[in-house]
Structures are given as structure tokens and as C-alpha cells.
Image (tube, grey):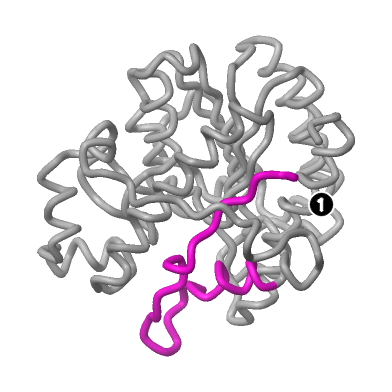
Amino acid sequence: MLPLVYHDDYSPELPPGHRFPMQKFRLLRDHLVASGLTTDAALLRPAICPADVLALAHDRDYIERYLSGEMGRDELRRLGLPWSPALARRTVRAVGGSLLTAELALEHGLACHLAGGTHHAHRDHASGFCIFNDLALIALSLLESGRVGRVLIFDCDVHQGDGTARILENVPDAVTVSLHCEKNFPVRKAKSDWDIDLPRGMGDAEYLAVVERTLDYLLPLYQPDLVLYDAGVDVHRDDALGLLDLTDAGLAARDRLVLDHCLGRDIPVCGVIGGGYDPDHAAVARRHASLHFAAAEAWVRHGLA
């Protein structure tokens, strides 16, 4: 069975009306269980990520300041989330979940998280709802341990993965690829190894053609030992913070395309859900489920079962 990673810590309460849809993680789990794709008992529960592992990508002073609740008002405003012990626990649990997902992907060829993709977190500060950068941490942890020789991060969130790019800018075996809307957050872009700037309003056909061309070129060029796929759904036409025009069918086609290109070259894939924003939290959870349905199909199609 396709390895899926989740924990009940993932959806702590936020103040009523907060724009971040924190309940989407729980609702995603509920949707996948209700659909019959998995059962709650089959979901793999991660451990909390230790501070020493967080320090591979983040300054220790910043780690301690966040975990102890000593963030200043300006820092919290830049983060966009109020601090609480439950959110701090959720944060380190979810990073542990992404690390576990990557390990399972290396073992089985494919694994997916029901969270993850915190690509705006920088070495010494939070940004854009992101506290610790799970994508950078996976890359640094696996490279340092020798589990992989090269990692390629394929980030399809509508916003540029600026934190990932800056943390990994001097790590040549961690290849950062960001496909994002050029007229969107962050205003000041970082420099990824490969930045693919997409025009506002791009629809399914044009977007999928860009994804295919990019994979066709970069996968043979780098031949990575693992792809970290950030399957952000804020590219959807109804997303509250996106500016692209993908449909449900376009999302599903993108996820199939990425998985088939990687698995067809025997490259393991670790999938994380990335961004997705909608006042209707159940709707955005259903969009995120596109990754997991596509992965379950690819699991069978590529003979991983």
C-alpha cells in the first residue's frame, strides 16, 4: 500500500476567521479515509523532529526562540500565525512527517505526506505561514547522511520557494526548481537553481506543457536520487491567494505527469502538499487529495505495489 504520513497534531485551532486553513490537514485525512483510499489505522504517524536536525537548516537561536514562544511581534507578523504550544508542537511534528515521508520514498519508490511544503521558511526567520523549511531539511539531512548523492526539489506551489532557494544556495547537490506565478508573493524573489516564472492567468494546457518541458530537460540533466515534489494547489483558479487558472482536471494531470516522469526513470518521489487557500476548508482539502489519488494510481501503474 502507498505509504501515507499524517498525525492528529496537524490541525491545531487558530483564531476564528484566520486566513490560513489549518483544518485542511484533518479534512484531507477525513476525505482520503471516506473515499476508501486509506484507513486511519494505515496512516503512518511521525515523531517530532529533534532540534539538532532542525539546526541543519536553521539557526539555533531562531529554533529556540520559536519553540519557547519568544518570537517578537514583528516576527510573528511576518509569519502570519499566532504562537501557541499546540502550533509549536504541530510544526516540529510536521517536519518530522516530511522527513519520514522522504525515508519511505527511498525505501518504496513513492510516499506522500498529508502536510509539508513549508518553502518560505528561511534560515533565521519565519515567513508566509512557514516556520521551519521541511524541503531544505530533507535535502540537507539525506545528503549529509549519504543516503542520496543528489536531490531535486520540484516546487509547483504558486509562490516562489524563496526560503528553500536561500538555504540551499551553496549546496550544489540540492537542486532547487520553482515553477511559480511571477506576480505573486514573495515580492522580492530569491534565486533558485531554476526559476520558471509563469504569467498571471495561465491555464491548464499552457501550464502542463511547461511542466512537461521542464521535467524532460532537468531529470536527465541531473539524474537525482530523489525528487521532492511540492504539489501546491494554490495554482487552482479558485484559490484565495493564487493568480493562475488551473482546473481540478489540470491539477490531477499535473500530479500524474510529475509522478510518471520521475517513476518512469526509476527516481523515487516524496510528495508534500504545499499551499492551498480557501475559506471553504473542505474544498481546499479535496484539491490537495489530487496528489494522493494520483500517487495511489501511480503506485499500481509503476509496479510498486
Q: Magenta stretch?
A: 1-30
Is residue 195 in view from this perspective?
Answer: no
Residue drawn at 59 percent across, 63 percent down? 276
Q: Please rate how many residues cluster around mark 1, counting C-alpha atoms within 10 Å: few if below 14, some from 14 to 19, many from 20.
A: some
Residue type marked 1: Ala
In the displayed structure image, the side of residue 297 where residue 69 appears, left or right: left
Number of numbered labels in the structure image: 1
In the displayed structure image, the side of residue 92 where residue 11 appears, left or right: right
In depth, the one of 181 and 139 nearer the eye is 139
**Residue 12 belongs to magenta span:** yes
Quarter of the rendering containing residue 216: top right
Which residue has dot 1 on it? Answer: 252
Q: Is 247 located above or below residue 171 in the figure? A: below
Q: Position of residue 28 (x, y in %)?
A: 64, 67
Q: Position of residue 41 (x, y in %)?
A: 63, 62
Q: Position of residue 212 (x, y in %)?
A: 79, 30
Q: Position of residue 80 (x, y in %)?
A: 33, 68
In the displayed structure image, the side of residue 21 where residue 1 appears, left or right: right
Q: Is 107 located above or below residue 280 in the figure? A: above
Taken as a whole, is the magenta stretch helix, strand or loop? Answer: loop
Residue drawn at 34 percent across, 51 percent down? 48
User: What SS does tag 1 mark?
Assistant: helix
Residue drawn at 76 percent across, 73 percent down? 34
Residue pushed farthest bottom? 16
Residue drawn at 81 percent across, 51 percent down? 252
- Check the picture and name the quadrant holding the C terminus: top right
